């Protein structure tokens, strides 16, 4: 392994503004470089971001510039992850923007199956499996709910077994304006002690634009969320693409009609009315915000058992790592 030099990039995903969105490290691995999982984990620890993504050429004849299929793995500072949205977006941004990949559509081979990524202008479209979740009784999660603090108005608790994500919805009795949701702080240590079953906790709500549930550009948010990952030493994840697959599934099930406003800010001017009908495959768009300190906007497209996430990314650093 001595003498190996790797390119590394830091990319802020789900934003076009530096130091917003969610940062990820991206490391392209040439076909002749074969690193043990232990080394990949150490690189992720060295980068010390929520996720480090490794793009792998699958064949000696492949190239980052010409190929349309790549391997992709994600590591936190503690372990390999099964699915990571923002690091997928960051990886695609590196291929398109730094490695001059000529394709408009690429496929990532991952632990969650084939992920299809397309580019359209400044936007990157990612196609993920839906995060189907089932309702659970609040009594199963009393300690976790207690860690959320003095919060009233629990609407639902649902669990996504494939990702080990728990989603908890909050009624507007608890969050009258979006500022309250952004400033609310759970007990992260108590949350971590409450269970070893989970990877991530999502808390979500929604409200009218008049209470601040809209972007600076005027687009109404169909839902907002916050995500906590204390089991991987991440108190709060800034913007979590994989969580949107669970959120899209939940809010689609709990919406009879959804009117979504699109503005020039997200590149989809006009309005679209979407009706949810039983036993009918419906395609619809949602505009979401993750209300972390860094914050980020995601456009979510749900089609049957697939979720397409639309986002932008900005490069903030690149360099070399010598092994």
Image (cartoon, grey):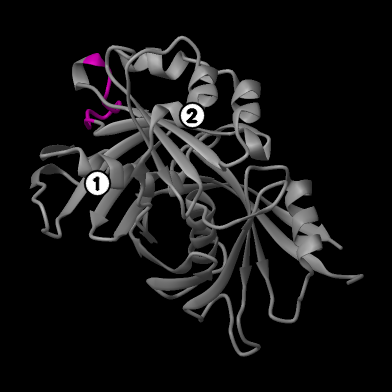
Instruction: Estimate the x, y position of residue 149 in percent, counting from the top left.
Output: 50, 13
Q: Tell me whether circle 1 and circle 2 mark residues in contact (CB < 8 Å).
A: no
**Residue found at x 19% / y 16%:** 210
Q: Nearer the viewer, residue 116 or 202?
A: 202
Left or right: where 73 falls relative to 134: right
Q: Is residue 92 magenta?
A: no
**Residue found at x 49% / y 29%:** 141
Q: Is residue 281 above or below residue 108?
A: above
**Residue 265 seen:** yes
Task: Report the magenta residues as a range.
Answer: 211-220
Instruction: Estimate the x, y position of residue 140 in percent, counting from the top left.
Output: 47, 31
Q: Nearer the viewer, residue 129 or 270?
A: 129
Q: CA distance from mark 1 to mark 2?
A: 40 Å
Secondary structure beneath label 1? loop
Instruction: Estimate the x, y position of residue 298 in percent, counting from the top left.
Output: 35, 42
**Residue found at x 16% / y 37%:** 261
Q: Badge 2 is on which residue?
A: 141
Rendered image quadrant of residue 321: bottom right
Secondary structure beneath label 2? helix
Q: Quadrant of the N terminus?
A: bottom right
Q: Badge 1 is on which residue?
A: 267
Instruction: Estimate the x, y position of residue 40 in percent, counting from the top left.
Output: 75, 61
Q: Is residue 219 magenta?
A: yes
Magenta span: predominant SS is loop
């Amino acid at each position: 392994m001595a003498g190996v030099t790797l390119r590394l990039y830091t990319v802020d995903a789900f934003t076009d503004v530096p130091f917003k969105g969610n940062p990820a490290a991206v490391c392209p691995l040439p076909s002749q470089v074969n690193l043990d999982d232990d080394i990949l984990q150490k690189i992720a620890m060295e980068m010390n971001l929520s996720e480090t993504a490794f793009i792998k050429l699958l064949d000696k004849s492949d190239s980052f510039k010409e190929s349309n299929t790549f391997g992709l793995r994600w590591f936190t500072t503690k372990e390999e992850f099964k699915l990571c949205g923002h690091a997928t977006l960051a990886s695609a941004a590196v291929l398109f923007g730094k490695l001059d990949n000529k394709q408009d559509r690429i496929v990532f081979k991952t632990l969650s199956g084939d992920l299809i990524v397309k580019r359209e202008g400044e936007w990157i479209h990612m196609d993920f499996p839906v995060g189907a979740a089932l309702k659970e009784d609040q009594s199963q999660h009393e300690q976790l709910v207690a860690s959320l603090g003095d919060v009233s108005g629990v609407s639902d608790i649902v669990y996504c077994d494939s990702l080990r994500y728990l989603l908890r919805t909050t009624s507007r009795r608890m969050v009258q304006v979006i500022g309250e949701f952004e400033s609310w702080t759970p007990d992260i240590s108590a949350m971590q002690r409450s269970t070893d079953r989970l990877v991530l906790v999502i808390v979500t709500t929604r409200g009218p634009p008049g209470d601040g549930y809209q972007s600076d550009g005027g687009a109404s948010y169909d839902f907002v969320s916050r995500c906590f990952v204390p089991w991987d030493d991440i108190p709060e994840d800034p913007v979590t693409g994989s969580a949107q697959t669970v959120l899209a599934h939940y809010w689609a099930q709990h919406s009879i009609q959804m009117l979504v406003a699109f503005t020039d800010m997200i590149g989809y001017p006009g309005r679209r009315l979407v009706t949810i009908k039983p036993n009918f495959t419906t395609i619809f768009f949602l505009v979401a915000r993750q209300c972390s300190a860094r914050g980020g906007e995601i456009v979510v497209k749900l089609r049957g058992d697939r979720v397409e996430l639309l986002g932008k990314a900005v490069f903030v650093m690149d360099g070399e790592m010598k092994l």
